[in-house]
Image (cartoon, rainbow, N blue to C red):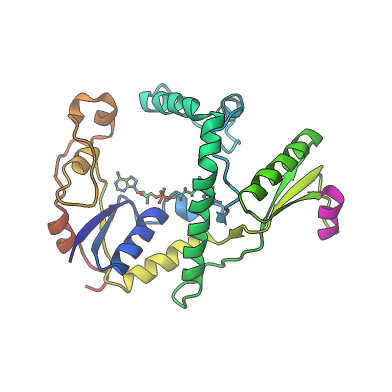
Amino acid sequence: MKNAIVVGGGIIGLSSAYYLKKSGWNVAVIDQGDFSNNCSYGNAGYVCPSHFIPLASPGIISQGLRWMLNPKSPFYIQPRLSWPLIDWGIKFAKSATARHLEESAVPLRDAAIISQRCYEEWNSSPDFDFAYEKKGLFEYFLTKEKAAHGHELVEKAVSLGLDTVFMHADDVRALEPQTRINLEGAVLFRGDAHLYPNKLMKSLLDHLKQQDFKSLHKRVTWTQMNTFNGSAYSYPQRDDTKNPYRKHVYDGKIEPLDCESLVKSAPSSQE
Ligand SMILES: Cc1cc2nc3c(=O)[nH]c(=O)nc-3n(C[C@H](O)[C@H](O)[C@H](O)COP(=O)(O)OP(=O)(O)OC[C@H]3O[C@@H](n4cnc5c(N)ncnc54)[C@H](O)[C@@H]3O)c2cc1C
């Protein structure tokens, strides 16, 4: 049987473990925490093929700079003199092009559609309970200018095969007559779904625990990743200690991770 180490037990790591186990691999998941202190537990739970526009898109830079300085914005980054942050910012700015937007639409749509199928498969199993519902998603526009952009969005979404309609303000208000809704128009993406991420993560973890799930609580360093031996991961070899960025995350203790012995020695949920 083949052995794999998965680093990080968020939705990406735990679903990787789920599908690896299903394909007959021995898997150990390493996480620095207890699998609950991560984005996957606390996000908004949208599963949305409608999110085919990448964050790095034209116009985002000026808006992003305003957002970055506002702690209440969805894109707040604590200002600090940090090379990784500057490096990331340069790459982000270079990616915010019309071409990137065009090239990303299909892969982003497809990743969300594949995720939806996986969630629907899990949702049909009695092992999982995460309040999955496919009721669509509204995007409201508060100004006439933004509502005009809504029409372009519908056109693009329909060209990508997504069941999407523009709704006028009064039609939206008629759906919720008890609520005063301030808007100029809305787009309804009928194919979007939502779920409770905390329930999803708990269900997934509980399911894995019934499947001889092996886990280790440990913070993995870049150095260890580079020395993985025979694992599913392959990182470029670098002299970490000379790289200021890598040195920053290096915790001072080199302890190579050997995939096979680690997977075999990791405590099992059934022990
Ligand atoms: C406010 C908010 C709302 C969001 N809403 C949505 C939404 O509605 N829909 C949607 O699709 N996406 C949403 N997202 C994005 C989504 O939450 C993330 O894309 C997703 O959870 C990332 O999953 P992950 O497994 O990659 O990372 P995480 O969930 O962050 O998990 C990473 C894990 O790796 C572990 N780890 C990290 N470094 C190490 C190390 N060196 N050694 C050992 N372990 C380590 C951490 O402890 C953690 O458990 C939202 C994000 C935020 C912040």
Q: Quadrant of the C terminus?
A: bottom left
238 or 262: which is nearer to us? 238
Q: Residue 78: x, y in percent?
A: 49, 30
Kindly report the secondary structure that dominates the magenta region of the rendered protein.
Answer: helix
**Residue visible at 81% across and 59% down in the picture:** 175
Horizontal side, residue 262 vs residue 118: left or right: left
- For the question of whether residue 6 can be seen, the reply is yes
**Residue visible at 25% across and 60% down in the picture:** 28
- Which quarter of the figure has residue 191? bottom right
**Residue visible at 56% across and 62% down in the picture:** 195
Q: Residue 225: x, y in percent?
A: 22, 43
Range of magenta residues: 168-176
- Which quarter of the figure has residue 153? top right
Question: Vertical placement of 74 versus 179: above or below?
Answer: above
**Residue visible at 42% across and 28% down in the picture:** 88
Outermost residue, bottom side: 126
Q: Residue 224: x, y in percent?
A: 19, 42
